[in-house]
């Protein structure tokens, strides 16, 4: 049986999609995946087709299939290289504080030269530029300055980001495969000092992050924290 989309056997196309779910973290290491009947309904195919795709992924070492126990994504041996993009809401609420989000700026623009180089796009390509503040117990906790590549994520232009932060929306809707982090210290200029309720030249902790979905860059973000109370913890 062939797919209309790519000419491959149906089981092969399903196998490719499932492998991508594993690689991008939609199916997380150690998690129990849906049963064959549910997957067959989801893909609109026979259960035997799903069975073959799962069987071959198990033979490749991607899945662990056990009778009556279900099928789980295999956790790689040794130190995990998985890194979860943190949700700022969760980061604040886990301290027992109350979270609030405020959108300060939303515009579709050609980014400045320094951002173009980070996004690796031609100067005529438009991006969605967002600036927002995250509060902990009504005190400014993080200033987020973000550019989303609309060539990669065109659906982001339809989201107003008035009620959901770009951080939370991207983690929820856009699986990523690679990420780059640059950590640094800086001093607050007049604008950032005002937004973060600091004195000018106060210290800032800065995270620059780029994320990709396969070879396509999704977003570039600069996150600014008041340096006097922020600590970063990463579990690998």
Image: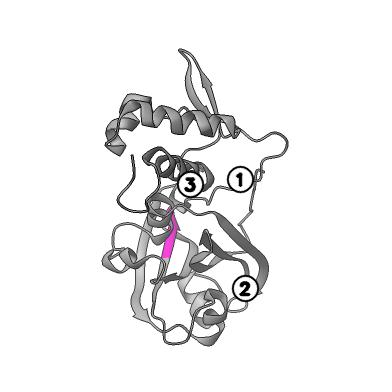
Q: How crowded is mark 1: few (under 14 residues within 10 Å), some or many (20 or more)?
A: some
50 relative to 230 in the view: left or right: left
Q: Is residue 207 above or below residue 48?
A: below
Q: State whether the magenta stretch is mostly helix, strand or loop.
A: strand
How far apart in space, not on screen, are marks 2 and 3 (Cα)?
A: 44 Å
Earlier-in-chain disc, 2 versus 1: 1
Helix, strand or loop at disc 3? helix
Q: Mark 2 points at which residue?
A: 202
Figure coloring: one colour
How far apart in space, not on screen, are marks 2 and 1 (Cα)?
A: 34 Å
The magenta stretch spans which residues? 133-137
Q: Residues within 10 Å of mark 2 (few under 14, many from 20)?
A: some
Q: Which mark is residue 20?
A: 3
Using the image as rendered, state which of residue 47 and residue 65 is in the foreground. 47
Q: Which residue is located at x 30 percent, y 69 percent?
A: 157
Q: How crowded is mark 3: few (under 14 residues within 10 Å), some or many (20 or more)?
A: some
Q: Residue 132 carries which label?
A: none
Quarter of the picture containing the N terminus is top left
């Amino acid at each position: 049986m062939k797919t209309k989309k790519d000419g491959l056997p149906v089981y092969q196309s399903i196998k490719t999609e499932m492998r991508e779910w594993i690689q991008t973290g939609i199916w997380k290491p150690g998690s129990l995946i849906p049963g064959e009947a549910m997957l067959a309904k989801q893909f609109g195919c026979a259960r035997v087709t799903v069975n073959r795709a799962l069987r071959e992924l198990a033979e490749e070492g991607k899945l662990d299939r056990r009778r009556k126990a279900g099928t789980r994504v295999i956790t790689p041996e040794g130190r995990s290289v998985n890194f979860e993009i943190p949700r700022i809401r969760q980061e604040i609420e886990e301290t027992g504080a109350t979270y609030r989000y405020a959108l300060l700026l939303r515009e579709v623009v050609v980014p400045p030269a320094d951002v173009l180089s980070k996004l690796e796009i031609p100067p005529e390509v438009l991006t969605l530029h967002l600036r927002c503040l995250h509060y902990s117990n009504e005190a400014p906790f993080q200033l987020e300055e973000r550019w989303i590549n609309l060539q990669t994520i065109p659906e982001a232009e339809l989201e107003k980001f008035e009620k959901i932060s770009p951080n939370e929306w991207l983690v929820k809707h856009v699986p990523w495969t690679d990420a780059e982090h640059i950590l640094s210290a800086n001093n607050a200029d007049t604008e950032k000092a005002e937004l973060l309720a600091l004195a000018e030249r106060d210290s800032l902790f800065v995270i620059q992050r780029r994320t990709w979905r396969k070879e396509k860059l999704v977003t570039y973000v600069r996150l600014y924290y008041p340096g006097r109370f922020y600590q970063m913890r990463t579990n690998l």
